[in-house]
């Protein structure tokens, strides 16, 4: 599947840029350079994904879950120690779906 290869390459490329503390330098919107942490979680198992197969999720997101069950991208002091971008875990997605 083409998307599977693309998602995997994209994540591996980002992981290769990380230092031993899972951090990398990035540019802010204002042109500053800051050190940001990146955190990937353990992948979902096939059993977890099968258990929720009745819930329609985008193919790209399902491929991401097979690599990392959520991620916190670009956490640094620039944004007050919050992740600039969070890719939700399957649990967070399901909690949001149930509470709606």
Image (cartoon, helix red, strand yellow):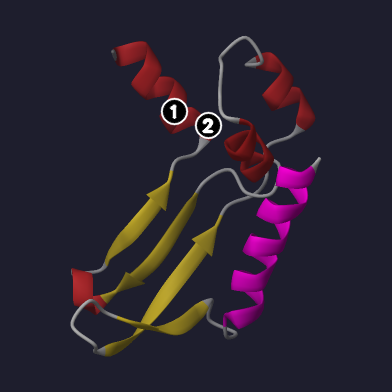
The N terminus - image quarter: top right
Could you tell me how far apart the alpha carbons at marks 2 and 1 are, in whole angstroms?
Answer: 5 Å
Q: Residue at x 45, y 21 (%)?
A: 94
Residue beneath disc 2: 90
**Depicted 92 relative to depicted 40: above or below:** above
Tell whether label 1 touches label 2 (CB within 8 Å).
Answer: yes
Q: Quadrant of residue 62?
A: top right
Q: Is residue 3 magenta?
A: yes
**Depicted 53 relative to depicted 64: above or below:** above
Disc number at residue 37? none
- Among all residues in the image, which is located at the extreme top? 54
Q: Is residue 35 left or right of residue 51?
A: left
Q: Residue at x 20, y 69 (%)?
A: 79
Q: Quadrant of residue 15?
A: bottom right
The C terminus - image quarter: top left
Magenta span:
2-18
Where is residue 20 shown, x and y percent of the image?
A: 60, 84
Secondary-structure class at tag 2:
helix
Q: Residue at x 59, y 71 (%)?
A: 14
Disc number at residue 93? 1
Q: Residue at x 68, y 15 (%)?
A: 51
- Among all residues in the image, which is located at the extreme front? 2
């Amino acid at each position: 599947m083409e998307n599977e290869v693309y998602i995997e390459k994209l994540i591996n490329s980002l992981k290769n840029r990380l230092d031993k503390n899972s951090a990398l330098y990035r540019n802010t919107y204002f042109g500053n350079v800051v050190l940001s942490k990146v955190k990937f979680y353990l992948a979902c198992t096939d059993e977890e994904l099968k258990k929720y197969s009745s819930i329609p999720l985008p193919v790209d997101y399902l491929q991401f879950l097979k690599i990392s069950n959520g991620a916190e991208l670009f956490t640094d002091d620039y944004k007050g120690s919050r992740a600039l971008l969070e890719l939700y875990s399957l649990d967070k997605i399901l909690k949001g779906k149930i509470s709606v």
